[in-house]
Image: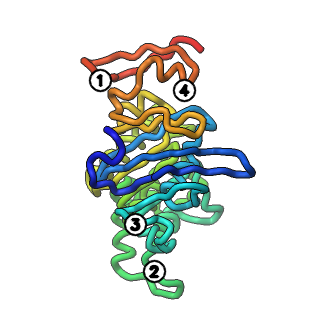
Amino acid sequence: MVPGEMGRELLQARGVGYRIHGRSILADVTVAVQPGECLGVIGPNGAGKTTLMRILAGLARPSQGQVLYQGRPLARLSDRERARHIAFMSQNPHVGFGFTVRDVVAMGRYPYRGRLQEWRPDDWAAVEGAMAATGVAHLRDRLITELSGGERQRVFLARALAQAPRVLFLDEPIANLDVRYQLEILSLVGRLRDRYGWTIVMAIHDLNWAMRWCDRLLVLYRGRVAACGPAGTVLDEALIQDVFGVHSRIERDGHRAVRVEFLSA
C-alpha cells in the first residue's frame, strides 16, 4: 500500500527529517498510519526507529517536515490534549522507587485531571478496569520494582489503557523477555487492540514476530524508508540482505511470507 492511498490516515509523517549535532538521524520519512492497524517499525540498530517513534508520538520535534494527526499538525496540540489521544510505552519504562502497581496505572489518568483536582469515580473506574483487562489487579499493592519483566510490561500496558488513547506506541515491548513472555505480551496487545480499537505503532526487532502480529511493516535503514508494505509480502531475501546484512530464507504460504530463517552473515 502506498502511504496515503486510502485517504483516511489517522497519523501522517510528511518528509520528516531529524538532525542532532549536525548528524542526520532521519531523512525524508513519509508514512501514513491507518485507523485500527498495527504498523511495525523494523530495521537494524541505529536505523532511527526510536527517534521516528518519538516524533510520530509528538515527544520530539522533527528538524524537517511535519507530522499530522487527523489532518492537524501534531505540534499544535497541547501536551495534555496529545496525551488524551496518544500513549507511548518506552523500551525500558522507569517510574522510580516506592510506587505500587496501582500508583503506576493511575499515572495514566493525569491528562484528564487538573493539578489540584480531586480524583473522580470515573478515574478510579478506569484504573480498576485497566488492571483487570491486563491481568494485574492481584498485584495492585506490590511495588513495581518487585515484579518480573513480563509483569512490569503488563502494568505499563495497564497504564496506557487507563490513559484511554486512540494510538499506542510500543518501543520494543518484548525486548529482554523470554519467549513465553514475548508471546504473552504480544497476545495481550492484540486482545487489547481488538477490544478497544487501538491503532498501534510498534518498533520490534524480531522479524518473525513482526510478520505474525503486524499488518504492515515500515523498514528503516540509515534513517530512510527502505520499504513499506503488507507484513506478509514486503520482506524478501534481497531486502533482508541489504538492510540487515544477513543471508536468509523465507518460508511462504503462497505469496505470503510466514517465517524467516537466518542462514549466515
Q: Residue at x 29, y 51 (%)?
A: 36
| Marks 1 and 4 close (CB-CB < 8 Å) | no
Name the N-terminal-most of marks 3 and 1: 3
Type of amino acid under label 1? Arg
Residue at numbered disc 1: 256
Q: Residue at x 34, y 22 (%)?
A: 257
Tell me, yes or no, if residue 129 can be seen here: yes
Q: Mark 2: few, some, or many residues within 10 Å (few <14, many ≥20)?
A: few
Task: Give the SS element for disc 1.
Answer: strand
Distance from label 2 to label 4 (Cα)?
45 Å
Question: Which mark's residue is nearer the viewer, 3 or 4?
Answer: 3
Type of amino acid under label 2? Arg
Question: Which mark's residue is nearer the viewer, 1 or 4?
Answer: 4
User: Residue 130, percent across and down?
Assistant: 37, 62
Name the N-terminal-most of marks 2 and 4: 2
Disc number placed over residue 243 in the picture, else none: 4
Which color mode does the image show?
rainbow
Task: Give the SS element for disc 2.
Answer: loop
Residue at numbered disc 3: 72
Distance from label 3 to label 4 (Cα)?
33 Å
Residue at numbered disc 2: 113
Distance from label 1 to label 2 (Cα)?
47 Å
Vertical arrangement, residue 67 with respect to residue 27, above or below = below
Tell me, yes or no, if residue 178 can be seen here: no
| Marks 2 and 4 close (CB-CB < 8 Å) | no
Name the N-terminal-most of marks 1 and 2: 2
